[in-house]
Image (cartoon, grey):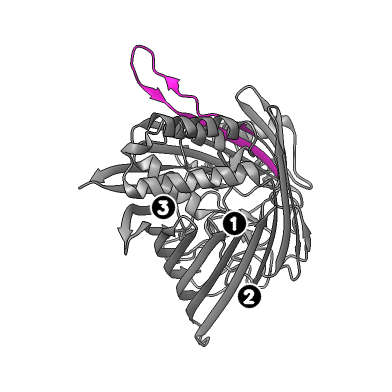
Amino acid sequence: MKLHKLSYSLFFVCFLASAEPWIDTSNIYLRASIQQLADAGYIKTPVTTFPLMWLDIGRDLKQINYGLLNSSEKQAFNYLNHQFRMAQKNNKKLEFNTATKDKRFTSFGEDFRDKNNLKVQANYMSNSFAIGLSSSYTFSPQDNDKTRLDGSYVAGFIGNWVFSLGKQDRWWGPGWDSNLSLTNNARPMSTLSLSRRAATPLGIPFTDIEIPWTVTSFMGVMDDNRVINNTLLWGFRLNFKPLDGLEVGITRLAQWGGKGRSKSFGTFTDVLLGKDNCGASGLDCGENKENEPGNQQAGYDLRYSFSVLNTPVGFYGQYFAEDGDNSGSALSFLTEPQIQVGLDTHLTIFSAPTTLYLEYTDTYADCSDTNASTIGNCFYEHHIYQTGMRYQQRTLGNLYDNDASSLVLGFISTISQNTNVTTKIRHLRLNKDNNDKAPDNAIIGNPLTKVAEDMIMLSSKVQHSYKNWRYTIGIDLSNSKFENNIADKNQTNLFFKVEYNL
């Protein structure tokens, strides 16, 4: 056993010197394995902020005594070990996917949005910097952008900090199907970011308490077709584990600047201090609110895991709100908070280790000024930045946009080390107030549907690896019912993906 553990330790030392620096949002099975070992107490670092640093995962895994793991945890550990080897040996990858339709909702582990894509990826990492190149060609893009560099980055390491410039998907929060803050639903935009490289714990004086923590922040440019071109997006997330089993995340997002808007340091300082609501803290926006700095969202999320009859159970939730109008009250800085709640566990179903989750999300906010109306159309929206918290006509946060509720039952199963299966059953109520901010405008309002839509959706995919090849085949089946005398609609989307690691 000592020799076995030593071999793993030597492997991790070699890996940490040569692999790419982080885990992206493309592999739901890798995330499920990480979460299972975190719930069991073996991984100490916070794991609800993606990209997630490999360095943290490697350091925690080096401390695991493989002989103490149960059979399901061993399978999770082995899958992580396999992914480490792949990351170390395979620095170049070819990928092709085809589908009968564009993907309407893109969740964690789903890295294509448009049908028919060809991609080439390569990465390199030294002790001081890392480079990742991801070049793709999309044959029939929704946004007419056929050639893309999504997923590319250049990063430099200074002490325990990583500076990076690139286009990376982010997932901020504990949700498996969706989040209220940031998801990979929309294409990644160009960002300059700063992140902590390792979650080195903060020690509490005169106690044995140590709190692992990470922090990341970015500034991005929303260079798509929008009401205010080149809007800037600032993001901030603090993620920490104050107690065993408890993980906390604090998130802020802010749109500011852009064509015709102030981009001064003073304006950004007001954004940082939360002084971006007219009348708040003496902020004078002018008669036409021309000096209003920006549009913010903020909130927090929690995940708590424990064991019931030797079965791991996790409860998680997210509370996320729009910024308010402080002209009438100093207590209304954050208004119309929305929630996400979920429950997950790790079971063995038909001899297959499985992560099972049940997740509910609601983004309906009554934005009317009087009680006589029940109109939403305000979450992810803003009166100045009218394209809202969206990029390339997809929402940055919740997959189902505003005024929507979702109830999702999901299964993430490992059939063998080389074969995995994911299944989701979703009940979605999209745009449930049957109203839209701009029903005749493609870049303003709900991009999913301008009328109410009640959907039942079954999604499943199988992923199999063989030597340097990985194959994924899947299907989405949905039935939608509409108001306004619109006929019901059934849809089927078949997709196939093949990857080859050079």
Give the quadrant of residue 191. Answer: top right
Name the residue that disc number 2 marks: 101
Q: Earlier in the sequence, mark 3 or mark 2?
A: 2
Task: Name the image quarter holding the N terminus.
Answer: top left
Q: Is residue 255 visible?
A: yes
Amino acid type at image mark 1 = Lys
Residue 471 % position (x, y)? 58, 64
Name the residue that disc number 3 marks: 339
- Sort mark 1 into few (<14), some (14-19) or many (20+) by Cα contacts within 10 Å: few
User: Residue at coordinates 45% horizontally, 35% vertically from top-left?
Assistant: 61
User: Residue at coordinates 78% horizontally, 63% vertically from top-left?
Assistant: 146
Name the residue that disc number 1 marks: 467
Outermost residue, top direction? 206
User: Residue at coordinates 56% horizontally, 29% vertically from top-left?
Assistant: 13
| 2 sits left or right of 483 in the view | left
Q: Is residue 295 visible?
A: no
Q: Nearer the viewer, mark 2 or mark 1?
A: 1
Amino acid type at image mark 2 = Lys
Residue 214 % position (x, y)? 52, 32
434 in relation to 111, above or below? below
